Image (cartoon, helix red, strand yellow):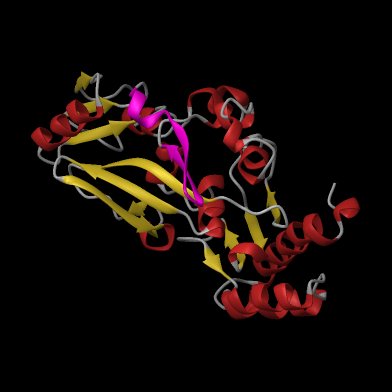
Amino acid sequence: MKAASFDYQRPATLKDALRALADGGGAAKVMGGGQSLGPMLNLRLTRPKQVVDVSALAELRQVAAEGDQLRIGAAVTHAEIEDGVHPLLRDGLLQSVAGGIAYRAIRNRGTLGGSLAHADPAADWVLTMAALGAQIEIASATGMRRVPMERFMQGAYTTDLADGELLAAVLVPRLGPAARWGYFKFCRKTGEFAEASCAAVFDPSRKLARIVLGALDGAPQALPALAAQVARDAAMPSRDTLRSAVAAALPAKDAVDRKLMVAAVERCLHQIFVPELST
């Protein structure tokens, strides 16, 4: 199939883009890398009257330090993070995660903001930003606002974005030198979305301890009690402990799904505590 007819705009500035969205009256769609919106247009799952392409906006392509946070522009691509184009994002969780997203062709065009705005429950950035406790910066013609990742993603393919708004940037904490992290996902084959996934971040300097499950029916789900135990014991928890934590968090899942998720959590934590077993 081919997309239904729509007007295409590629504004030169963020201000122009926000004006175009406001003028669109809810009938305009934002396009980042187009890796999600493009197929949806072709399948006619969405039929906007206007597409506003923000992928080249300079305001959305910057990475900068803001105090104890990093501000990452929404139009920064997965490949740019993977390749270490921005020095502030090198040699850490974000670069590691970026290199495992889909295929290189997708990473070349897909954007951080586009992935988060699409809000696929199995997406890598959705889980990663939940584990980091990121904040989402949202822009509109009337100003800027910030919301925590936990509130931004409200469900599968559902976010806090309103008509006339776009995701402008993501703010993530700058992890300290003692921080440790893990990320693991099960995919049927390389490049596919995950069947089960887990991200964990422990940073004593920020008192950050989070273990989060992904690839669920909706938004990622944190395991706060397990994270607190792991941070306190500074040791790999037993498999029985992991089974209990996953069962309590996902009571509606069947035994097979829970077993897969337990394995994802275990392999994620192995990257932190037993790195020689994580390959």
Farthest residue, direction right: 276
Query: Can you say whether 248 is above or below 149 in the image?
Result: below
Q: Quadrant of residue 260?
A: bottom right
Residue under the image location 76 percent in, 79 percent down: 241
Residue 109 placed where, x, y %? 48, 24
State how many labels appear.
Answer: 0
Query: Can you say whether 198 is above or below 76 in the image?
Result: below
Is residue 157 among what the camera can see? no
- Left or right: 135 with respect to 202? left
In the depicted view, which residue is nearer to us: 54 or 192?
Answer: 54
- Left or right: 214 with respect to 38? right
Residue under the image location 54 percent in, 54 percent down: 127
Farthest residue, direction front: 67
Residue 138 placed where, x, y %? 29, 46
In the depicted view, which residue is nearer to us: 262 or 81?
Answer: 81
- Left or right: 165 with respect to 154? left
Where are the magenta residues, as a range? 57-73
Query: Can you say whether 1 is above or below 182 in the image?
Result: above
Q: In which quarter of the image is residue 240?
A: bottom right
| Quadrant showing the N terminus | top left
Q: Quadrant of residue 101?
A: top right
Residue 45 placed where, x, y %? 31, 38
Residue 47 placed where, x, y %? 22, 33
- Left or right: 251 with respect to 235? left
Is residue 127 among what the camera can see? yes
In the depicted view, which residue is nearer to us: 192 or 222?
Answer: 222
Q: Does the magenta stretch include residue 61?
A: yes
Residue under the image location 56 percent in, 51 percent down: 128
Q: Does the magenta stretch include residue 106?
A: no
